[in-house]
Structures are given as C-alpha cells and as structure tokens.
Amino acid sequence: MDIRKDFLSLAVPDIGEDEINEVVDALKSGWISVGPKVKKFEEEFAKYHNVKHAVANANCTTALFISAKVLGIKKDDYVIVPTITWQSTANIVEQLDAIPLFTDVEKDTMNINLEDVEAYIKKYGSKIKAIIPVHISGLPVNIDWFTEISNKYGIPIIYDAAHAVFSSYKEKMVGQFGEMSCFSFYATKNITTGDGGMITTNNDELAEQCRIWSYHGLPKDSWKRYSAENASPHVQSIVPGYKFNLTDLQAALGLAQLKRKEKFIGIRNELIGYYNTLLKDLDYLETPVFETSSGKWGNHVYVIKFLDNDINRDKFMLELRKFNIGTNLHFYPVHKNIYYQKKYPNINLPNAEWLMDRILTLPLCTKYSQLDLEYVTDAIQYIYENNLAVK
Ligand SMILES: Cc1ncc(COP(=O)(O)O)c(C=O)c1O
C-alpha cells in the first residue's frame, strides 16, 4: 500500500475567511482581551443552547474548576467522576482538595455507569457534594436519570460537555441541564477558539458567582471600566478570584465558528456515516455509538474498539503512524494515570480496563474528505491482514 506524503493528523481546525475577518475586526477595534466580542459570544452561545446564562472561560478545565468552586466543593468532599474522561474532570476535584470517586463506564457508549453512581451514593450519602458526568464524544448521558438523582439526594450535577457543543437530549440542547454544563473550544473540538471554554446555567446566582470567580473576583461587567460607559471606578475584589477569562480575539473565532455550525454538523455526520460504512464488515473491531433513544450528535471523536484479543493497540497506533496517520486515545482511564494510581491504588473498574487497550480514535474533522477516510480504513485493513500489530 502506498504511503501518503502529508501527515493526516487526528483533527485540524476549520478556519476560513469568516474567522479571519472576525479576528481582524477584533484586532482593529482595540479590544483584544475581554470585551464586547466575549459578551456577544456568550449571548450567541446561550441562545444556541436555549439557556439563560453562558459565562466564557479560558478553557473547559477552568470552567469545570470554577463550577465546582462556586458550588462550594472543598477539602475532603466527595465528587463522583467517570474514569473514562480527560484528566481535567478529576484534576479539578484534586485541586480543590476534594476526593474523586471514580466510576466505571458502559462498554458500548463509554458513558458513566449509573449503577456505580448509585452504589457510591448508598455508601457515602451526604459526603457526596457533586457528580460530574461526561457526555463522551458528545453522546449525552441519561440526563433524566441524573435529574432524578439530583432532586432525590440534593446532589448538584455539573455536566462535562467538553465534547457536546452540538449535542441534544430529547430535542433540547445539553447546555440547559444540571446546575452547570462546561464546554471546550480546544483546537480539535467541534468549534474552536484555539483554547476556550463556556459555562452554561439557568441559575442566576451561580452565573453571577462564576463570572466573579473567573475574573479576579471583581463585580460583574468590570471589563467595562475600559469602555466609554459610565462604569464605577471601584473595581475591587469581592472574593480572591482567578484570571480565567476568554479574550475578544478568541471570542471572534468562536462567533465565526458558531455561525458555521450547521455546515460543521452536516460534514461530521456525513464523514461518520462513511466511516461506519467502510468499517461495518470488519469483525475484529467495533464502531462507535453515536445516538441513543434520547440523545444525539455524539459526533466529536470517532473511537473504534478492537475486539480481536491478539491485536496490540499501541503497536497498531505506531503502524498507522508509519502510514502518516495520527490517532489518539479517548480516553485512557484517569485512575490508571501515574498520579491517581499512586494515590488510589485499589480501584478496579473492569469495563474501563477492558476498553483501555482496545480503543483507538481515528482522524476526523470537517477538513477531511471521504478519500482521507478510505486511506485510513485501507491502512487499518492492511495492518490487520499482514499481522503487523499482533501481541
Ligand atoms: C471530556 C473532557 N473534559 C475536559 C476537557 C478539558 O478541556 P480544555 O482543554 O478546554 O480545558 C477535555 C479536553 O479535551 C475533555 O475532553
């Protein structure tokens, strides 16, 4: 099989004239840090998710941190998190000196295992101060179930919606649910601002607190002190806040990307459908779940699972790299990371541990064509048929 000349990375951002024009507009306006474009991006995002408030953040990690902080998560509190996620979901719990309770995930959807959540609630009761379910790959978790649990036990839910900008649950965008939802606009995400994040909530008080804690602990709209508006000269910290704001340069990208969302969704779904067609007859792997009866647009990353026990997944990744194909893992279980393994050595989560040597994320983004996908699937088949990645 011929090897392509250029490297097909996992994903590249889709930046066009609209994004360039918006950024140039920000540059020319004089507002390059937090200013009117951040405000507009927040408004547009809130409108898209049909939620009362959207608070822009430096990234999804800071958004998760701030959300947990304003809920009062503190030393020795328990917070339930799934182990299949990006480290941030658990890291922010550790940063607040709280204790993450890792759950397993479903083997098929890779979303949080509800039985484990229930078992923890039975065991630790009111010591549990929050649950952070993750909409993995944008596939919504069982939100009705979490709403019921939250109401029954008074445990707030922060949704890690890093992958779920386009996702809906029972025809409603996911940003409307829970105490808060946190989104990521990292370079590989469905819409990007380079780095960036957003907290959505319908709760006025939580929104206000998120805003204050994300921006030096200053009162709301303090950025207007640099504008012609008659803002108060007293910008004094109410709390010892963080500097976790988005900038207008980033928001400019976000505004342009948000305008192109329908196009992005269309291309992603077409490419995912094509991968499914190309891979459906290969019995040594399983294709991802992208829709459940209640949630859809799990279209952020395309994660296959190797079913053949003789395949060495890490070797497979290296072989694909020889074909100039970049892949990734979404995700290696967090409890297996060096820090967590040392601190919590006795965790046993069988589905996650079954998945961890079998998952592989294939290249997917709106810049790729069906030909790119054919190249990837041909390479997979070549490596498998020639036993290049066996244990
Ligand atoms: C599930 C999940 N949560 C949180 C994050 C953190 O997002 P960010 O890079 O915007 O901080 C990521 C990033 O990839 C993620 O995948």
Image (tube, helix red, strand yellow):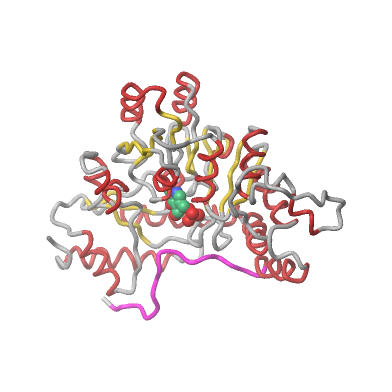
Q: Is residue 228 left or right of residue 203?
A: right
In x, y percent, where is residue 314? 23, 62
Q: Is residue 222 left or right of residue 7?
A: right
Residue 15 is one of the magenta-drawn residues? yes
Q: Is residue 1 above or below residue 35?
A: below
At 20% from the left edge and 49% from the top edge, which residue is drawn? 307
Q: In the current view of this chain or complex, which residue is farthest to the top? A: 152
The one nearer the camera, 200 or 107, is 200
Q: Quadrant of residue 378?
A: bottom left
Q: In the current view of this chain or complex, which residue is farthest to the bottom? A: 5
Observer able to see residue 369: yes
In x, y percent, where is residue 72? 52, 34
In x, y percent, where is residue 381? 24, 63
At 78% from the left edge and 49% from the top edge, which residue is drawn? 234
At 70% from the left edge and 65% from the top edge, which residue is drawn? 32
In x, y percent, where is residue 93? 42, 42
Q: Quadrant of the N terminus?
A: bottom left
Q: Is residue 1 above or below residue 365?
A: below
Observer able to see residue 269: no
> What's the magenta region?
2-17
Q: Quadrant of the C terminus?
A: bottom left
